[in-house]
Image (cartoon, rainbow, N blue to C red):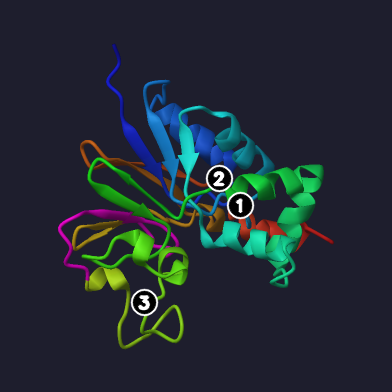
Amino acid sequence: MTTSRTIVVGDIHGCFEELLSLLSLINFHDNDELISIGDLVDRGPHPKEVISFFMNTTNAHAIMGNHEDKHIRIFDGELEPSYSQEICTVQLGSFYEESIEYMRTLPLYLRRQNFWLVHAGFLPNIHPKNLPKNTLLRGRMPWMKSSYDKSFGGWWKHYRGIDPVVYGHTVFHDVHVENNTYGLDTGVCHGQRLSAMILEDRTFVQVEADQDHWKNIRETFSL
């Protein structure tokens, strides 16, 4: 019997081909669990295929990212879309409403193998159910007026919790390991790479992006 693994993948942003390449590289199989750390959509070429994969693959799950939250709020009339959401809406076409309903089902956090999985931010000694939504989705600490405070820096620089945390949202050039936290957003939609972490042995797997998707989409897409 093949050993099961818990595989957490960084922000995919509609880059379906890179996701398939990564799953092939790690020989993803039915005993594994794949978890997206959020931001399935926006800026990449194939958001429909990404969402369909997570909707229809039994052992693939996702948590909510700030981009899913934006689409829900836009659909509900609470937020004006930015250019990336306008493009994504067109890309999804008739699948858009079904995508929104799926996004509504996504949890704000998960716990696997003693790891906390969140999209953007975390605080030690506080259960994530008691954290503000903007902390989990945007990394905004409760005392901050905006998501980024130069005097504070990234929350991971100050984390001293016992439980390891895996997160996305903040784009790093490579997987960022600091103070028992693991940042997996390595900018695949910007032409960098898609990264995943296997929780059981804390190893990383990466595939290179084949192009700067968001740059090319901005240059060629017309609404």
Q: Residues within 10 Å of mark 1 (few under 14, many from 20)?
A: many
Which corner quadrant of the image does residue 55 belong to? top right
Q: Is residue 23 above or below residue 177?
A: above
Kindly identify the residue that appears in the image at 30 percent across and 72 percent down: 155
Q: Nearer the viewer, mark 2 or mark 3?
A: 3
Kindly identify the residue that appears in the image at 24 percent across and 72 percent down: 157
Kindly identify the residue that appears in the image at 32 percent across and 65 percent down: 122
- Badge 1 marks a residue whose secondary structure is loop
- Who comes first in sequence, dot 1 or dot 2? 1
> Could you say which is closer to the camera, residue 54 or residue 12?
54
Residue placed under numbered mark 2 in the picture: 210
Cα separation, mark 1 vs mark 2, equals 17 Å
Tell me which secondary structure the magenta stretch mostly adopts: loop
Residue placed under numbered mark 3 in the picture: 141
Amino acid at circle 3:
Met
Residue 175 appearing in the image:
no
Q: Residues within 10 Å of mark 2 (few under 14, many from 20)?
A: some
> Could you say which is closer to the camera, residue 130 or residue 142?
130
Give the percent coordinates (x, y) of residue 4: 30, 24
- Who comes first in sequence, dot 1 or dot 3? 1
Kindly identify the residue that appears in the image at 20 percent across and 54 percent down: 163
Mark number for residue 41?
1
Q: Which residues are magenta?
A: 159-174
Which corner quadrant of the image does residue 183 belong to? bottom left
The answer to whether the residue labelled 1 contacts the one labelled 2, judged by CB atoms less than 8 Å apart, is no
Amino acid at circle 2:
Asp
Q: Residues within 10 Å of mark 3 (few under 14, many from 20)?
A: many
Residue 180 appearing in the image:
yes
Residue extending furthest toward the right: 223
Amino acid at circle 1:
Val
